[in-house]
Image: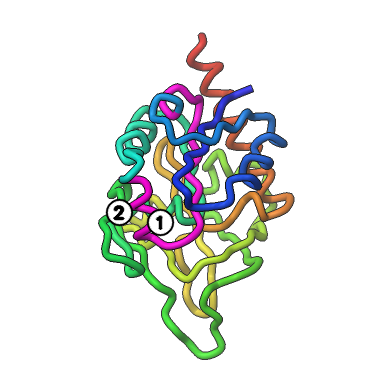
Amino acid sequence: MPVIAVIDYDMGNLHSVCKGLENAGATPKITDVPREIEQADAVLLPGVGSFDPAIQHLRSRDLVSPVQDAIASGKPFLGVCLGLQILFDSSEEGKEPGLGIIPGVVRRFKSEPGLTIPHIGWNRLDLTQPEVPLWQHLQHQPWLYFVHSYYVDPIDSAVTAATVTHGSQTITAAIARDNLVAVQFHPEKSSTAGLQMLANFVQQIERRSLAMSH
């Protein structure tokens, strides 16, 4: 069973993510120890809350380099919700610089008549990079569960792997580049489609381990 380091920096309910990974056949390990992150087969960066505290918690625990190193190492890496946003350069929500792994800015939904902010609830995903391993065996335009007021706006639109439309605004709901995938929605709260994604992530890790052992 592949070991997935779930990075613990006091920003999110890790229990439901871990349960989803266990159901998919992996061993989640909640950790803030750089060595354990380095030794894991894959890394998951969760996150709920605000941009600045998230970055401050990561820095205070000396977790910025381990996150950057894990992504650079080529092992499968999955960011969820705030774990997507902090990969960017900066956010309109705060003043702290982000991790700068994906060039771009985190923006707030623009107000428009009849639009609720935050964007909360189920919405349809449009897959703009359909070949991403995380999307395998999903229905066309799967329904996923969202809770957010801010969204990522990458400079290079080629990294956008899926979009979602809220009101008249179509925004990036997921990014993918090499071994890195990060999503704005909550797979662990997204019923069948979300659990399928977590299973796909585990299968991707197993395929990589198999390829490396030959």
Rendered image quadrant of residue 204: top right
Q: Which residue is mark 1?
A: 85
Question: Pointer 2: residues within 10 angstroms few (<14), some, or many (20+)?
Answer: many
Mark-to-mark CA distance, 2 and 1? 8 Å
| Residue at 53% from the left image edge and 42% from the top image edge | 131
Residue 195 pos. (x, y %): 68, 45
- 2 or 1: tag closer to the N-terminus: 1
Question: Pointer 1: residues within 10 angstroms few (<14), some, or many (20+)?
Answer: many
Residue 67 pos. (x, y %): 37, 38
Q: Is residue 58 magenta?
A: yes
Label drawn at residue 208: none
Q: Is residue 115 left or right of residue 92?
A: right
- The three-letter code of the residue at mark 2 reads Gly
- The three-letter code of the residue at mark 1 reads Gln
Q: Secondary structure at mark 2?
A: loop
Q: Which residue is mark 2?
A: 98
Decide which of 52, 103 is in the foreground and name it.
Answer: 52
Q: Which residues are magenta?
A: 37-59
Q: Secondary structure at mark 1?
A: helix
Rendered image quadrant of residue 109: bottom left
Residue 26 pos. (x, y %): 64, 29
Q: Is residue 50 left or right of residue 72?
A: right
Residue 108 pos. (x, y %): 40, 72
| Residue at 35% from the left image edge and 34% from the top image edge | 66
Q: Does residue 29 sit above or below 135 in this rendering? A: above
Label 2 close to label 1 by CB (< 8 Å): yes
Q: Is residue 200 magenta?
A: no
Q: How many numbered marks appear? A: 2
| Residue at 50% from the left image edge and 25% from the top image edge | 41
Q: Does residue 204 sit above or below 158 in this rendering? A: above
